[in-house]
Image (spheres, helix red, strand yellow):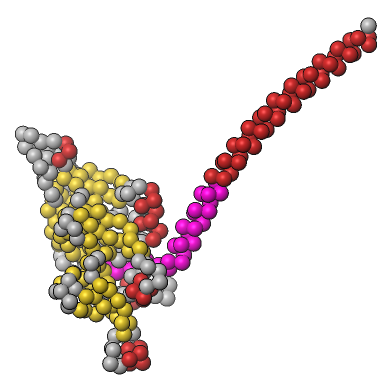
Amino acid sequence: MSQQSPTWQVKNEGSFASISITLPSIGGPHSNINNITTFHCESDAIITTSQTIDIRGSMSGGVLAGLARAFLTRESFFTTIVENKSMTQVGDALIASSEPGGVTLHRLVRGEELILTSGAYLAGDEGVKVESSMQSPFSMFGNYSGTGVFLLKASGVGCLAISAFGSMHKYVLGVGERRNVDNGHLVAWSANMQTSMKLASARAGIVGSMTSGEGLHCEFVGPGVIYIQSHKPSAVMGSDGGGTRSRNGGGNSGNPLVACIVVLVFMIVAFGFLIAVYFGGDGLIQIENGGYNDGRAYKRQYNNGGGNYGQNEL
């Protein structure tokens, strides 16, 4: 029996959307425990599950991958794994983003890669792999597109759930077709697309673009797909520090300099610890050997002294 895939459905489409996932039972006369249906999702995304559902945490990709997700892309260190191990009963789960916003489902095919902004990942089939990705820290797109240098890359085969701030909009570009997107509104796009930064108005020039309130725009060249959000997290949550930072999609992954400093400090501490263990081990051996030799010398001195004392007395 081949493994069955979960069924995904968006509920209440709009700014307060959620996703219902139905997980088939193992079932059948030739059922196998390895054929359980499962999917993975962002931590704290589960709203409710049926009684047949099992939930567990997992470090997808190992410790280093978990650290990269947590420190560089605002994702959780652990990934939630949802499984239905029942032989006869169908299971279901309802998930949603931690904050209000739109969600959409994207069906990944073999060989396709989708770039996600920080906080855009919500859930995916077992065959979908989501890992950290890095743009060039010297590129105009990475520094001025509003996405940040550290992003997520989704690949594999299956359904991928993406979250946004505000409503979600999808654009499919043909070969050579171009589309401009205001920085801060990007959620996800095809990895094979050409990207660049340009003035919002080429005819008006720098002054006209800046005075229009638009400034720089992100340009995409097809073929590929683009997902954008209707609102900027900074504009809604408060860019003056008075609001809470949004964990939905379309967010900036943060200052790359700060992330590089954190990684550098971690490497220095780890390297220093290894050096301390290496030289500390040699010092311990020397101390032990020195103590043993001093003990033997003291014993010889004591014996000689004791013998001389006995001879003088006689």
Q: x%, y% of residue 99?
A: 29, 64
Comparing 291 with 97, the one in front is 291
Q: What residue appears at the point 77 percent right and 19 percent down from the top-left corner?
A: 299
Query: Does 176 sit left or right of 231 as displayed?
Result: left
Q: Main secondary structure of the magenta part?
A: helix
Q: x%, y% of residue 87?
A: 12, 37
Query: Does 72 sit left or right of 269 as displayed?
Result: left
Count of numbered labels shown in the rendering: 0
> Is residue 244 something that shows in the picture?
no
Q: x%, y% of residue 220?
A: 24, 75
Q: Above or below — where is 32 with respect to 295?
A: below
Residue 221, picture quadrant? bottom left
Residue 255, picture quadrant? bottom left
The stretch of residues the image draws in magenta is 248-273
Query: Does 38 sit left or right of 75 as displayed?
Result: left
Q: Is residue 209 magenta?
A: no
Q: Residue furthest top?
A: 314
Q: Above or below — where is 66 with respect to 208?
A: above
Q: x%, y% of residue 50?
A: 17, 47
